[in-house]
Amino acid sequence: MAARNSISPQIEPMKRYLIQFAHEHLDFRVQEIRSILSLIGCQGIMKEKDLSDGSPFMEVELSSETVAKALMQRTVLSKRLYELWGEGTSVYDINTQIKQLPKEILEPYTSENSSFRIVVETFNKKLSTLEKISRIEKLTEPDSIFYGPIKLNCPDYSFHLLEFYHFDGTSQPASEPSKVYFGRWIADGQRARIQQYHLQKRHFIANTSMDACLSMVMANLGQIKDSDFVFDPFVGSGSLLVACAHYGAYVAGTDIDFLLLHARAKPSRAKQKTRSRNESVRSNLQQYGFESRYIDVLVADASRHKMWREGSQFDAIVTDPPYGIRESAARIANVENAKVKSLENGAQRYPQKTQYQLGDIFRDLLNFAAQFLIKGGRLVYWLPIYKPDYQESNIPQHPCLEVESNCEQPLNSTISRRLITMVKTGEFKGPESHGEQKASIAVDHYQCETFRQKYFKATEMEANEKEKGGPPSSSNSYS
Amino acid sequence: MLTSNIIKGVTKGFPLGITPTKVEVKEVDFNPTFIVKTLTKIDYSALYQAANDVGHAEGLPEKLEDDVKENEDLLKKLHNALLQVEVIEGELVCPESGRKFPISNGIPNMLLLENEVENVTQ
């Protein structure tokens, strides 16, 4: 930073903070923080290496506490953020360090008028109450930095002693911590939102509704902000739109499933016989007070882009395409010499749906995004992957779109899905005139077999292995 | 009604005409930022026509002046037309082919019929 400061003196000096992550969706944590920092227009230097041995703690340098708080206002993968006061491998290290901290840092929080408490938290090891108390006593011994009274409930300031014990998953966790941190609590992340928007309490769900946490991560990677216009071409029950509306976006979507959008599909909840008539995307938004953010939902085929007027522009496209496992991938068949079929009662007949190749879904999606996103707008979508075959060239490309991040969510030992975030960087020059401006996939992951075939082959193999005593699989839901 | 401004019939049919049978005006929080932003993207004459189709064009000018941003009164009227007026039942009509797309329960159905599909692909 020193070199930078000399060039542009406006840059504020960076301060050290510590993020405590929740231990889930590990691959997404750094990307979520990075995306939020770029959205709020702030610099941050993350020490990603901190996370490499399974630790949930990561140091980050930020310019101010205001930035730190703004960051915590959005992240769902972080539990808490602290101003970092000391780090080492023992309480002794911490004690030595905090005693050397400059007055400006200490005094506002440790004077005799400020009540405080110290919370001890450990990762990979449980400490007894006595062990915790002995640590707290060491930190608050007579010549310590703290002059104020201890108050366990609602103190003026909260300090956390955090210990990480290495554990490789095979033997016992290490007996001594590999990392100890001490910090002043600044803010909590948005973990509570996961309960607030939990699918169990959602009015309308479909077979593949995205859970609340990942929906919000997607909204963060899509950099959804107030007054954005966000679109989901595979809207389903609208769970991604709920997350986007939470961040202030106006939302719209399409789905090919007429019955689902009109609440006449088979219910997704166990024991529910029929859907109630008002199960709709609108009612989901209504449930959380976001009805004002609802624009529209249409029954339409995502593979047909001609229904959109040229130049209509979305700030972001956030979507979870069907992979053909729990929700079939369909588009309208392109029947040659289709005959006019009128039913006897004169009712009109909609054409049959045909299978929609996964590769085509993604090419269509990228072409759509390239055309209808604003410049700088983001496309966020899931790509299902058969791990043994996966390579980076499987990721669909478009000359107008750049891959911003690629995070993996493992679903079992061979199957995972990757959340791809792309930014529109190039100008789209019209759909017809420039044939070269088309989406392409260097190596199509689904060329030889459909994902469904790969999926069931893999699941079968795993079941066989399990019989032989192989590793257990996790059960996760899919589209 | 914002949606009617961003969709069209398959080839050229823009703007789609609206034949409403049931129109509702929903209460939606007024957000001038979004309205101003949206105005830069939409085709105003199409919005004006749509508002006339559903009988909610009252107070809307035929053409938009440049100073619309400062005119809160007008922004509120545009807000009403774009976000509050909603066609619950009715039809969207393609001006080119006369093809009708039904709207039921507030959800337009843009799927084509079987005999129409072959004509429009590629």
Image (cartoon, rainbow, N blue to C red):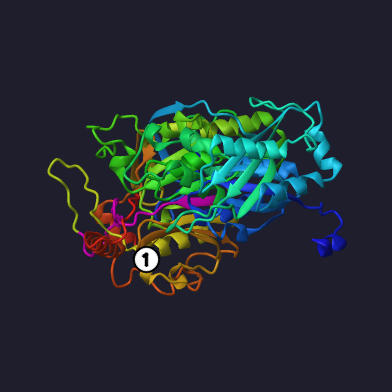
Magenta span: helix, strand or loop, mainly? loop
Q: Which of A399 and B54 is in front in this view?
A: A399
Q: Which residue is drawn at 53% across and 46% down?
A: A22
Q: Which residue is drawn at 68% across and 45% down?
A: A182
Callout 1 amino acid: Gly
Q: How crowded is the residue under tag 1: few (<14 C-alpha within 10 Å), some, or many (20+)?
A: many
Q: Please, is residue A433 above or below residue A365 in the view?
A: below
| SS at mark 1 in the image | helix
Residue A84 located left or right of residue A442: right
Location of residue B109 in the rendering, given as x and y in whole percent from the top left corner: 34, 43
Judging from the image, mark 1 belongs to the subunit labelled A
Do we see residue A75 in this rendering?
A: yes
Q: Which residue lies furthest to the left in this view?
A: A344
Location of residue B22 in the rendering, given as x and y in whole percent from the top left corner: 38, 28
Q: Please, is residue A119 above or below residue A384 in the view?
A: above
Q: Nearer the viewer, residue A373 or A174?
A: A174
Location of residue A165 in the rendering, given as x and y in whole percent from the top left corner: 55, 52
Q: Which of A380 and B43 is in front in this view?
A: A380
Residue A100 located left or right of residue A248: right
Residue A95 located left or right of residue A206: right
Q: What residue range appears in magenta?
A: A313-338
Q: Is residue A269 a member of the stretch shown in magenta?
A: no
Do we see residue A39 in this rendering?
A: no
Q: In which quarter of the image is residue B120?
A: bottom left
Location of residue A299 in the rendering, given as x and y in whole percent from the top left corner: 35, 45
Q: In which quarter of the image is residue A226?
A: top right
Q: Mark 1 points at which residue?
A: A359
Q: Is residue A334 a member of the stretch shown in magenta?
A: yes
Q: In which quarter of the image is the N terminus of chain A?
A: bottom right
